[in-house]
Image (cartoon, rainbow, N blue to C red):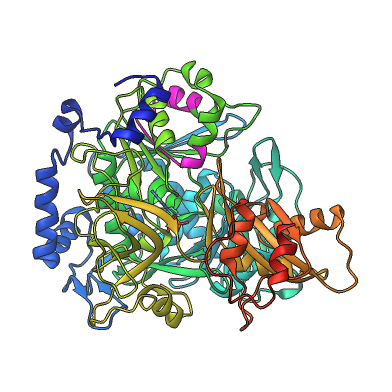
Amino acid sequence: MSSDPSSTIESVLQESRIFTPAKEVADKARIRSLAEYQEMVDAAMSDPDRFWGDAARKELHWFEPFQSVLDWTNPPFAKWFEGGKTNLSFNCLDRHLENGRADKEALIWEGEPGDVKRFTYRQLHEQVCLAANALKSLGIRKGDMVALYMPMVPEAAIAMLACARIGAPHSVVFGGFSAEALRDRLIDGEAKAVITADGGFRKDKTVPLKNAVDKALENDACPTVTSVLVVRRIKEPVAMKTGRDHWWHELISEQSKDCPAEVMNSEDRLFVLYTSGSTGKPKGVVHTTAGYNLWAHLTFKWIFDIREEDIYWCTADVGWITGHSYIVYGPLSNGATTVMYEGAPRASNPGAFWELIQKHKISIFYTAPTAIRAFMKMGRTVPDQHDMSSLRLLGTVGEPINPEAWMWYRDVIGGGSCPVVDTWWQTETGGVMISPLPGATPTKPGSATLPLPGIEADVVDTKGRSVDPDEGGYLVIRRPWPGMMRTIHGNPKRFRESYWEYLRPSSKEHIYFAGDGARRDKEGYFWVMGRVDDVINVSGHRLGTMEIESALVSHPAVSEAAVVGRKDELKGEGIVAFVTLEIGRAQTDDLVHELISHVGTEIGAIARPDEIRISEALPKTRSGKIMRRILRALASGDEVSGDTSTLEDRSVLDKLRS
Ligand code: PRX
């Protein structure tokens, strides 16, 4: 293969080139060929109970064995491995102390200012036990929700594992969300405690996390929260409320190192993670103990084909599902060495990632297309200055990857020899659903390729009927899988309606609809197109247009708002807001800036619109529905095509155009 990306890109686009796994890769892999993959697929399809049951017995530790594999008598509410007793923290830590990994490095952490901490499995186990006892000392018991609002420090992973250890479900809130967004999530989840830090380092700045927690709790807004545990990170002064706030290091120093893992039922709640949907407030996606553990474990093992000596690094934040499944739980459950990085590449250090790969001899690297596109734009000079020969496998996640970026990743970062795994999945699926297996699956740049064994993915029409090859449709999953979300916290109705009743199959079948559009080619390869609902994907971050609209409308100057996505070369999608003002409010540049920063305060910096267009009116149908199709075209500068006869007032369109 040529190493000149521009020439290879051309040929990929024209020839649909296929990269077959190299013999050296396949020979060493766990799953070595498409035939082996197909055998697993067939086994899972013909006898799913046996397939999943065998995997669960083999891969996880059980205090007591399960009695049944799947109970699907009340769809869409699944129960997996009923009767079984296990603990995720035990599976991630204790069992490795007895299987020869006690002194193996579990976690390597690199701080933004360059400080490094390393934890062997024995040391991580000890820290988790101390933290678990600290939570108990605050009165946290099995079933109590604990929220985390943390920077990327080791204590974030330790706190997650400590919660899992004592059976307290965690709800990690991304540290980039605002105090208001945190408050909503604390209230909805009825959190009893919040674990945070004095602040975090973000690029060249610090983020005052504890201040945001104080703001979220102001005026007793979250009465269920009785304790706040604060990690000292940036060493800036913060207010500590007596009786409520405790320093992590102080409380930990008083604890015993002995904390046996709580014996959990398979279906006991493990965590809630909020994500955006097309309607309403963010929804708390619920995952439970055994099924999630198995899925994070198996997918990590299959896709990254993990080996004892690997040093694995995923650049996500623990505030997202990728951080849960592929920084913390999947790697540790497998006894792997996982790297956690507090920082992000920034203008003052564009080589930060490559330096880390060189320094820690990373062998598996997992990042997002948006990062790859940003690096690609900067050129290959910086990465070429680093020795990245330790890499053997590259992964991407979060949004569709364009073939040019895929090729650049493979050539420039992977030196032309590392397989690239493009992994499609969601918060709701718990773990990866569609992805190549590095030793088995021939890859096509831009395609997530084939579903994992046991996953019956399909592309269908609105009635749930499979569409023909190369025809676009809705991406669905036809059977339950262990890592599937169990419900939406506090709203089972919304769970049923948004995922299982959106499409209207004529059969009695229960089909999971992911919210994405896709096409399947003649070889059965999946090409995910992106969301078909009112969710936009900005740099791999999922945002509901309605959340941003509500934030805008909460500003006193705004009467109405409609938000749409627009293609963005770097971020995947950008945010464009159309806004009408209250009578008497003048349109000024200052107001536009104020509105943008208002969205930042209400939700977080990731939701700030790229552009706000103020207009007299929004295009609506006679029944008052905003015609987003028109706004999307206007936002992208495209011709407004299709039927506009349902517009109530056609002059609105002309005004918006001008
Ligand atoms: O639209 C798909 C996109 O990200 C959505 C899920 O977002 P979230 O729950 O935040 O999880 C992100 C990390 C798993 C999906 O509905 N998406 C994720 N991975 C891919 C993708 N789109 C295309 N290709 C992918 N590999």
Q: Which residues are magenta?
A: 354-371
Name the residue located 58 percent from the left edge and 77 percent from the top edge: 646
Name the residue located 48 percent from the left edge and 66 percent from the top edge: 533
- Image quadrant in which the C terminus is located: bottom right
Name the residue located 87 percent from the left edge and 56 percent from the top edge: 588
Residue 48, image quadrant: bottom left
Q: Is residue 217 visible?
A: no
Answer whether residue 36 is magenta in the image.
no
Q: Nearer the viewer, residue 337 or 20?
A: 20
Q: Give the x, y percent position of residue 267.
A: 31, 72
In the picture provided, is 148 more to the left or to the right than 487?
right
In the picture provided, is 277 more to the left or to the right than 586?
left
Residue 515, image quadrant: bottom left
In the picture provided, is 167 more to the left or to the right than 174?
left
- Image quadrant in which the N terminus is located: top left
Q: Give the x, y percent position of residue 87.
A: 32, 61
Q: In this view, which residue lies farthest toward the top?
A: 385
Name the residue located 33 percent from the left edge and 29 percent from the top edge: 11
Q: Nearer the viewer, residue 344 or 17?
A: 17
In the picture provided, is 545 more to the left or to the right than 553?
left
